[in-house]
């Protein structure tokens, strides 16, 4: 063992046993020995026993450590099974406080789309326009609005996404959720008091940084607490906050007409304060998870702690080395581009195309976004879970017809991606028709009908995509993967910014009617192209490998 003192290098077990008191049965041998030699032999025997005892103790300690590790793993698996055996009521209790936080997130984020008006203002109503239109009050253009609504929000949002995902993997997710909601609520209230475009710009940047922390924390919490067979549905319930928040943002148009854009933002900020209070009371504590994490880190050697410091870079590299994840992120980026162009530019378009139906549009759009969007999201998650169960049950059978094609192309893990593939494809004609309705007395009603169809078929993608992403990367990297997913949405904000820049350049000297036609063409072709490409890449991700390149290289 390298632990023997100097002068005992020649000592061997056979030598010690030969001259030890226990083996020397003839007493006459001991008196013939020199006393010093006899003492040295006895000392060496005691040293040998001490080394042997230390070796036995070290062996027993390693054995005990392995046994303890196994017991901890079994306990953890049992705890996870108990924690993830969620009924519908338990899922709702967990998701509800996260949902109202997400509704506040989306309402605060997208309300700006309903507080601007780029129609040519009449000289006699200029004061009224400034009261109800932020762009008139603060004097900014279409291209500045595109920057404000998307890129300004994205700047800190993108930088914070990866950090937020890594923090969600390690620290108290309840504190992250409540803290982020508090910050974007303050940014919303600051916007309501802004006296210049630059103040609104800074507030949007801060809001973007805060909004990045809520989503990864929520999805990792759901992934830890909900069983796999209900994961897509649970993710869809939480994701429905996009549509509920979007519906409230649409109704902000009515509030804006009554109390003005500043008071409307104050109402939205008040809802954020209430959301923090409700979630603080109902959201389960995440303290035990942190205590276990700290205890585990204290038992881990220092070399592991060094690796922990680089976990963001390492986890990101490992996640992005998975081919399936690469195509999932690319498809999601394109899908985000479509959704963000609709979310930011649809309201200004309909206000220009149907100026006499502004109040009616606010109500109908709220019902479409909240009703059809929510229905599509929940059905998407429910159907995705059902497809996974069906694939598992029919795996050993010999399917025929369409069933055999599905089994040949998909597996139990990738079958949820059937929803975004079909949904994005069907959304193409529906969206094009809603922006290119023939002029008639029923044009507004026809446009709203196709808009409802578009939301019904397109918004089923979120929950299934998240569930496939989580199952591919594993629980230990769910937060980082979710941060990367949010980052793809942040980069997708470049699409409405680019659309706003093109739109602003094309309508500089155009009339109001020509302006709506230009915007209809940009929205029609831009959104439909992104839908088509996202559907293609979702399909490619199904056949891509779910193993990281590092794992494959090690196996080779």
Image: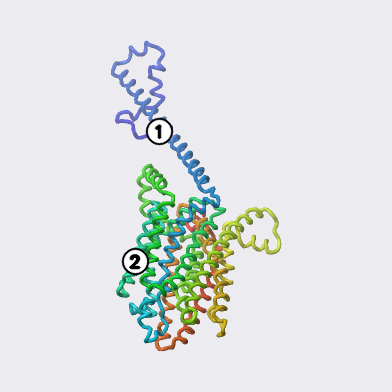
Q: Horizontal and vertical percent for residue 200?
A: 33, 71
Horizontal side of 47 relative to 399 (left or right) equals: left
Residue 264 lies, with reference to residue 391, above or below; the image says: below
Total numbered labels placed on residues in the image: 2
- Residue 189 has which mark? 2
Residue identified by numbered label 1: 58
Colour style of the rendered protein structure: rainbow
Q: Residue at x 40, y 66 (%)?
A: 108
Nearer the N terminus, badge 2 or badge 1? 1
Along the line of sight, which residue is nearer the eye, 99 or 389? 99
Q: Quadrant of the N terminus?
A: top left
Q: Horizontal and vertical percent for residue 181?
A: 38, 60
Question: What is the secondary structure assignment of the residue under circle 2?
Answer: helix
Residue 296 lies, with reference to residue 254, above or below; the image says: above
Q: Residue furthest front?
A: 258
Q: Give the CA separation, mark 2 to mark 1.
A: 63 Å
- Residue 417 has which mark? none
Question: What is the secondary structure assignment of the residue under circle 1?
Answer: helix
Between label 2 and label 1, give the one nearer the viewer: 2
Q: Quadrant of residue 160?
A: bottom left
Residue 158 visible from this viewpoint = no
Along the line of sight, which residue is nearer the eye, 182 or 49? 182
Residue 481 visible from this viewpoint = yes
Q: Dot 1 surroundings within 10 Å: few (below 14), some, or many (20 or more)?
A: few
Q: Quadrant of residue 483?
A: bottom left
Residue 63 lies, with reference to residue 129, above or below; the image says: above
Contact? badges 2 and 1 (CB < 8 Å): no
Q: Dot 2 surroundings within 10 Å: few (below 14), some, or many (20 or more)?
A: many
Q: Horizontal and vertical percent for residue 337?
A: 47, 71
Q: Residue furthest left?
A: 36
């Amino acid at each position: 063992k390298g632990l023997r003192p100097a002068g005992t290098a020649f000592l061997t077990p056979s030598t010690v046993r030969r001259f030890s008191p226990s083996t020397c049965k003839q007493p006459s041998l001991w008196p013939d020995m020199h006393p010093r030699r006899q003492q040295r032999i006895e000392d060496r025997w005691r040293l040998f026993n001490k080394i042997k005892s230390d070796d036995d103790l070290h062996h027993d300690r390693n054995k005990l450590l392995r046994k303890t590790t196994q017991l901890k793993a079994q306990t953890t698996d049992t705890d996870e099974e108990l924690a993830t055996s969620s009924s519908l009521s338990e899922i709702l209790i967990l998701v509800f406080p996260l949902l109202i936080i997400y509704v506040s997130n989306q309402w605060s984020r997208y309300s700006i789309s309903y507080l601007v008006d780029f129609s040519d203002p009449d000289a006699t109503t200029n004061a009224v326009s400034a009261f109800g239109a932020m762009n008139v009050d603060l004097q900014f253009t279409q291209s500045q609005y595109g920057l404000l609504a998307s890129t300004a929000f994205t700047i800190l949002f993108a930088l914070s996404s990866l950090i937020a995902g890594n923090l969600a993997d390690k620290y108290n997710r309840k504190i992250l959720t409540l803290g982020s909601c508090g910050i974007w609520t303050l940014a919303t209230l600051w916007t309501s008091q802004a006296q210049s475009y630059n103040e609104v710009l800074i507030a949007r940047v801060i809001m973007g940084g805060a909004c990045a922390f809520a989503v990864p924390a929520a999805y990792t919490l759901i992934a830890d607490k909900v069983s796999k067979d209900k994961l897509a549905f649970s993710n869809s319930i939480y994701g429905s906050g996009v549509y509920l928040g979007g519906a409230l943002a649409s109704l902000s148009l009515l509030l804006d007409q009554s109390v003005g854009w500043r008071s409307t933002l104050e109402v939205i900020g008040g809802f954020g304060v209430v959301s923090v209070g409700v979630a603080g009371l109902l959201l389960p504590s995440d303290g035990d998870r942190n205590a276990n994490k700290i205890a585990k880190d204290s038992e881990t050697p220092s070399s592991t702690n060094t690796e922990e410091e680089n976990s963001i870079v390492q986890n990101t590299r490992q996640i992005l080395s998975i081919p399936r994840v690469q195509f999932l992120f690319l498809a999601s980026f394109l899908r985000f581009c479509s959704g963000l162009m609709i979310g930011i530019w649809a309201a200004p378009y309909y206000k220009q195309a149907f100026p006499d139906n502004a109040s009616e549009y606010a109500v109908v759009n709220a019902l479409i976004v909240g009703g059809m969007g929510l229905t599509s999201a929940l059905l998407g998650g429910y159907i995705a879970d059902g497809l996974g169960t069906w694939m598992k049950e029919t795996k050993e059978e010999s399917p025929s017809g369409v069933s055999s094609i599905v089994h040949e192309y998909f597996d139990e893990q990738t079958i949820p991606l059937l929803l975004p593939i079909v949904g994005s494809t069907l959304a193409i004609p529906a969206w094009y028709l809603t922006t290119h309705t023939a002029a008639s007395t029923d044009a507004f009603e026809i446009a709203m009908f196709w808009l409802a169809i578009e939301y019904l078929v397109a918004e089923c993608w979120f929950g299934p995509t998240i569930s496939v992403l989580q199952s591919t990367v594993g629980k230990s990297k769910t937060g980082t993967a979710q941060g990367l997913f949010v980052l793809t949405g942040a980069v997708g904000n470049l699409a409405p910014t680019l659309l706003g820049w093109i739109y602003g350049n094309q309508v500089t000297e155009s009339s109001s009617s020509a302006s709506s036609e230009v915007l209809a063409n940009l929205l029609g072709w831009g959104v439909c192209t992104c839908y088509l490409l996202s559907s293609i890449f979702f399909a490619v991700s199904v056949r891509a490998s779910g193993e990281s390149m590092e794992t494959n290289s090690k196996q080779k």
